[in-house]
Image (cartoon, rainbow, N blue to C red):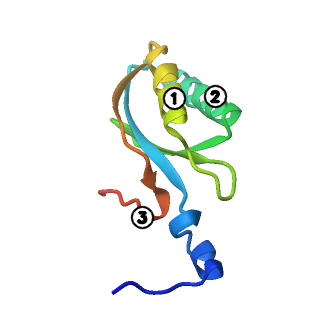
Amino acid sequence: MSTYRSKRSRKKLYLDEFAVFGFVISLKLNTDNDEQLEEFIESLAYFAESRHLLVGGGRTDRIELVVGSSLRFGSATDHDRLAIKQWVESREEADVVDIGALVDLHLLEFDD
């Protein structure tokens, strides 16, 4: 049985028409030192910001990054996924492992 929620409640909980979508990208980097790693991450962040996106996450062996909109109720799009994929593929220091589908970021879970 579905629960009725007012528009105000749905907005506060980011549900239904207020859901925020983004995607996860998994990378393996071929960097020789921390300076190259930092330069790659900064370049990716600047590129994402130019599309009104935010990037967060990390790890050392295989990097998992979450990409979402920088706008309050904005969502990443399939065009954003494609642009990020093309940008990463154009870089020599990264191998794209996987770019996930658009998912509701408020329901996203990670394995530890």
Residues at circles 1 and 2 in contact by the CB criterion of under 8 Å: yes
Residue 7 percent coordinates (x, y): 62, 78
Q: Work out whether residue 40 or residue 70 is closer to the camera in this orientation and state it.
A: 70
Please tell me which of labels 1 and 3 falls first in the chain.
1
**Residue 62 position in % (x across, y down):** 34, 36
Measure the alpha-carbon separation of dots 1 and 2: 8 Å
Residue tagged 2: 47
User: For residue 107, which numbered disc appears in the image?
Assistant: 3
Location of residue 78 in the rendering, given as x and y in whole percent from the top left corner: 49, 36
Q: Residue at x 40, y 59 (%)?
A: 108
Q: Compare residues 2 and 14 and report the one nearer the observer.
A: 2
Between the C-alphas of marks 2 and 3, the distance is 26 Å
Mark 2 / mark 3, whichever is N-terminal: 2
Question: Mark 1 sits on what residue?
Answer: 84
Q: Secondary structure at mark 1?
A: helix
Closer to the camera: disc 2 or disc 3? 3
**Residue drawn at the location 38% of the way across and 19% of the way down:** 30
Instruction: Tell me which numbered mark, 1 or 2, is placed earlier along the sequence.
Output: 2
